[in-house]
Amino acid sequence: LAESDEEVRDKAQALMGDGNPETRGALLALLVRRLGQEFFPVAEKIVVVLADPGSPTGLRESAAFALGLIPNNSPLTSHLVQLMRDSDSAVRSRAAESAGRLGSEELAPSLVELLGQAGTRGAARRALVKLKGAAVPSLLSSLASPATDDGLRQRIPRLLAEIDEPAAHDALTMGLKADDQALRDASLAALLRVRRLDPGKTLVDPERIRPRVLEEIEHLEGLQRLMDALRTVKGKDAAFLNQALDESTGRSRHRIFDLLELCHSPAELRRIRKNVAASSKILRDNALELLDSMLPREVKTRLLPLVERMHDGESVPAEVEPLSSKGLESALAELSNDADPWLAACALNVGARQQWPGATEAAL
């Protein structure tokens, strides 16, 4: 019977009283439910007025809470999208919590947007986990979008691990072959987190992991070859590059063992990983024998020699000759395109010092 939006707001506030947003929201939800389908236009008018940006923050927050307490097939829930874009983070968080309670896939894109905002990140994460597999398409869409900032891109794999459903595992497996190395690492870390919590669970088909293992082995082989060659280059700048190469080969070895852990016993792989780096030759040999027995031929024939080299020291193999000028340029060109930004920067620095003609072009 109210004649203006202001009167609607005043009457609704009088009915809800002066409690906190949860109490007033529960009363509002009860009012909307009691009005029923017959008086739906009245209920919608109340929600529209309370959710309006011009309403007091407390009323908008109450409206956001209330919408999570009504049936998820009600057309009124569509107003949560507006409330998840509210200017106040408390209202946006309430709307996210309600979206999680409703479990509606249609609200997932708005929740992903809130995941990228500091004030609403926690509420959005909890809501997306409640949506389970229904949230995965929106999360994948965000990963694929060039507009997604790096911070949000790195948080999505961890969230997929929390969802812990086949669709999420599949999305993380796809992330292992992303162009972005940071995203590949985040996806691998997320899969490992799930795997280690439940080692008996089969997350992915080992046949999908093997190509990633072989790719990383190929990368490590290339790094090892370049490291052997560049150790013949002297000078302070070359020392930085060699150190960066050593660190990068270490990370590559870790990725290989992490990938293998997705297909084999995590406890056994962690024990092997520890023993191949042990000072005791007996422990190292035993670890290598275990690797030899568990890995398929195409993997072990390439991986075992690389693991054995971990204890060869810093000496350059006898067959490696000092690089020619052309050979140095080729090596630096290859490293300047590496996914590791620090390694690429060190290579460009040496190139500039050595007056490599392609250094400027590579830097650009």
Image (cartoon, helix red, strand yellow):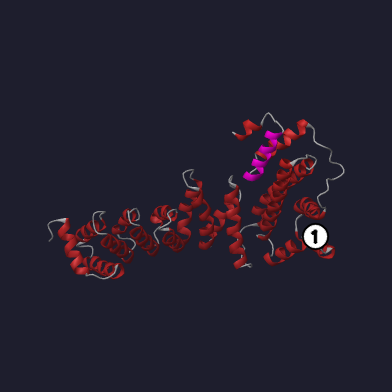
SS of the residue under disc 1: helix
The answer to if 41 sits in the magenta stretch is no
Give the residues in magenta: 340-353
Residue 289 found in image quarter: bottom right
Q: What predominant SS class does the magenta segment belong to?
A: helix
Q: Residue furthest front?
A: 236
Location of the C terminus by quadrant is top right
Residue to which mark 1 is pinned: 288
Q: Is residue 8 left or right of residue 204?
A: left
**Residue 233: quadrant of the picture:** top right
Q: Is residue 75 at all visible to an observer of this figure?
A: yes
Q: Does the segment drawn in magenta span residue 343?
A: yes
Residue at 57%, 50% (x, y): give it: 183
**Split into 4 quadrants, where in the image is the N terminus?**
bottom left
Residue flagged by tag 1: what amino acid is it? Leu
Q: Residue at x 78, y 63 (%)?
A: 278
Residue 214, image x, y percentages:
71, 49
In the rendered image, residue 80, in percent from the top left (x then y), is placed at: 33, 57
Residue 340 appears in the rendering: no
